[in-house]
Amino acid sequence: MAIYAAVFSPTGTSRQGVWSIATALGDAVLLDVTCAPAESRTFSPEDLVVFGAPVYGGRVFQGALERLAPLQGNNTPCLVTVTYGNRDFDDALLELTDFCREHGFAPFAGAALVGEHTYGSVQKGRPNAHDLDQDRAFALEAWEDLQAGWTDFAPPGNRPYKEGGKGGSFVPTTTEDCIHCGLCVGQCPMQAIAPDCAAIDPEKCISCFRCVKGCPQHAKGVFTPAYESFAAAFSEKLKEPKENAYFLPRG
């Protein structure tokens, strides 16, 4: 059995959970579609794929689905994960499960994983070591269920899906501390940053804050009173930690 981890993860949060789950089952190959679409590939029934993507407004980020679309299954077993910032995952896990089935995969278990939110100070440091241990334990349980013939996986959610899955509304700006190193330009998932590192196209930016978190000079951020007020209120609202939710075919 070949194991693959297929993930869209601008700040690496979704990738941590997906990789922990995949590697708990054996050696895995990472298929990171964060900055470019996956290469066309068809998997066999003997393969296993772990999918992961972030939740944007209760839906899977639509750009993630576009990047994952070239991957095709052939009744290929898969585990489905979404990562959300401690509010709710709403219809996202159901949506990604439906997407996998439409592309020839056979989802047999899924998880909604809590991660550090892009905005404010919400669940800093998550996933932590305990979260990742839970992910690995889930992977082994799911595998045991699959081997025992349990495959009737029914994720929570509603159809039609709620509105969501689009980018955020806060676009970072660049301060004079920028040294124009080009790191953010090369790492932006949406190619929204100008070659000089300064200007960010608001039509392309999805507010993932990869450039904010990755800038070695701390020259990117949202420095407006509106954002600061929102972030403070948001952080207070979501201060109580939620637990990861795991869904196995046996319930």
Image (spheres, helix red, strand yellow):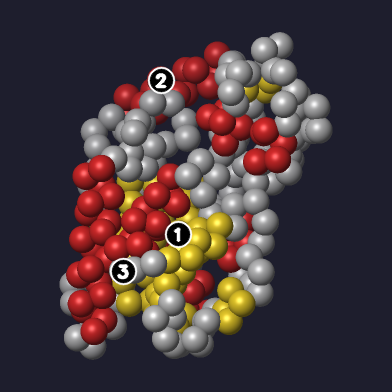
Q: Which residue is mark 2?
A: 232
Q: Nearer the viewer, residue 193 or 133?
A: 133
The residue positioned 52% from the left and 81% from the top of the image is: 43
Q: Depth-wise, is mark 2 or mark 3 nearer the camera? A: 3
The residue sitting at the right extreme is 195
Q: Quadrant of the N terminus?
A: bottom left
The residue sitting at the front extreme is 27
The residue sitting at the top extreme is 176
The residue positioned 21% from the left and 79% from the top of the image is: 145
Compared to 81, does 178 lie above or below?
above
Query: Crowdedness of circle 3 by 10 Å Cα count: few (<14), some, many (20+)?
Result: some
- Label 2 secondary element: helix
Q: Nearer the viewer, residue 159 or 155?
A: 155
Q: Is residue 97 visible?
A: no
Q: Nearer the viewer, residue 31 or 167?
A: 31
Question: Which is nearer the N-term, disc 1 or disc 3?
Answer: 3
Q: Indicate the position of residue 25 as horizontal and vertical percent values.
A: 31, 69
Q: Is residue 130 visible?
A: yes
Picture disc at residue 237: none
Compared to 175, does 119 lie above or below?
below
Q: Depth-wise, is mark 1 or mark 3 nearer the camera? A: 3
> From mark 2 to mark 1, how far is it between C-alphas?
28 Å
In the image, taking residue 51 as reference, residue 157 lies left or right, namely left
Question: Which is nearer the N-term, disc 2 or disc 3?
Answer: 3
> From mark 2 to mark 3, how far is it between C-alphas?
40 Å
Q: Which residue is mark 3?
A: 25
- Label 3 secondary element: loop
> From mark 1 to mark 3, how far is it between C-alphas?
16 Å
- Label 1 secondary element: strand
Q: Which residue is mark 1?
A: 52
Q: Indicate the position of residue 35 as horizontal and vertical percent values.
A: 65, 51
